[in-house]
Image: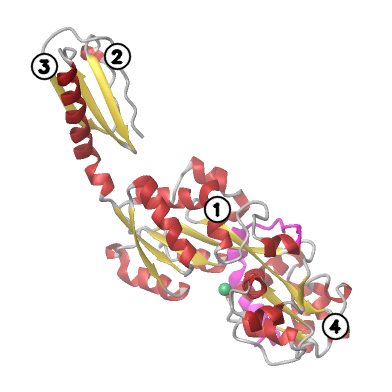
Amino acid sequence: MLEIQFDPLPTAGDFFARCVTSIPPAGRHSSLLRIILKTGKKRLLFILNKLPASKAAASALVLALGALLGACGAPETTTQIGVYSGRHYNTDKELYTRFTEATGIQVKLLEAKDDALIERLNTEGENSPADVLILADVARLDRAAGMNLFQTVDSDALNQAVPSDLRDSSGRWFGLTRRLRAPMFNADLVSAEQVSSYEALADPSLKGKLCLRNRRSVYNQSLVAFMLDEQGQGATEDWIKGMVNNLAEPVFSSDTPMIRAVAQGQCAVALANSYYLGRMQAGDKGEADQNLAGKVTVRWPDPVHVNITGGGVTRASRNPEAAQRLLEFLSSDQAQGGYAAANHEYPLMGIGEDPVLQAWGPFQQAKVSAERLGELNAQAIELMAANGWQ
Ligand code: FE
């Protein structure tokens, strides 16, 4: 963006120009021509003591101003931030390119498994090249915050774009997309009524029909944390015991094979994250999986447990301002659709444009905050271990 302001006309003399971060009051230059050029957060203050005498002189002046502004803006166009991301989707990269085009800030991306990134950032300490850390699941965001890997960010844009229940109350991390963990069932084997709530999955009528992922999964830990918040410890323990009693198969180590098992009838119902079914139904994982996923129906409990992917500015960041701008960009309307749809996730608000998600219909989101789920994580893990969830 280029912005030129003309103050009172000049009287006489030469001109000077300097790069400033904020525009000083007119003061002693009030009788001169002040030109303020702005690109991003860089500004060039140009004081001109007389108007150019000819058109040629005016053009020369414009060229000179352009060059001077370039010099001012130079540090910003070469600003680079390091992003450690547990997400790994091609459309994410397109968004980073768009961010660079809009801001001049280069993104150096390192994608790896979430837990490995947390460990790496922790080991690197103050020397880490990462300015932004993006992780799947609030349990991991909370863990990284507990390890003091984030710094606090106070941004009106983020506070507005990210609902308060989907961000840390002290500004260390912000949700960027939503995913729902819910019953997915085979309608040939059970009715929608039998799986209409999380509690229903513990009902003895589903004995030998339920499939679960293991308790190491942070997705399950966050779900149990949600149940703890909803129902308290006693009811949550009974719920876990009931589900363990209903298992059709030993626990799975990931969601996708579990959804296939539902389609193939090894289990009648499973608890899985929405985007795994989304990828299969959309055909992202090939025709065979798409056909299988056609036999699986998702059922939203009321309310449904919502989890997030999110990010924060690292404590080690040398460019916290640029890092914050990336988070603001990813949470903005212009980026939200693409960021969520990349993985068949839900944007921060609404359902978005993804036809697969639209077909699943609306849902009632649980009121518990993501931050609270993080706080309850340790207790959730204990309860799972104590009540037979392998
Ligand atoms: Fe996942």
Q: Residues within 10 Å of mark 3 (few under 14, many from 20)?
A: few
> Which label's residue is closer to the chain start, 2 or 4?
2
Q: Quadrant of residue 389?
A: bottom right
Q: Quadrant of residue 111?
A: bottom left
Residue 14's disc is 3
Inter-mark Cα distance, 2 to 1: 40 Å
Residue 336's disc is 1
Q: Residues within 10 Å of mark 4 (few under 14, many from 20)?
A: few
Is residue 287 positioned above or below 78 on the image? below
Label 2 C-beta lies within 8 Å of the nearest ligand 1 atom: no
> Which label's residue is closer to the chain start, 3 or 1?
3
Q: Is residue 71 magenta?
A: no
What percent of the width, then of the height, locates residue 278? 65, 70
Magenta residues? 361-390
Residue pictured at 67% horizontal, 52% vertical: 350
Q: Residues within 10 Å of mark 2 (few under 14, many from 20)?
A: some
Residue pictured at 62% horizontal, 53% vertical: 165
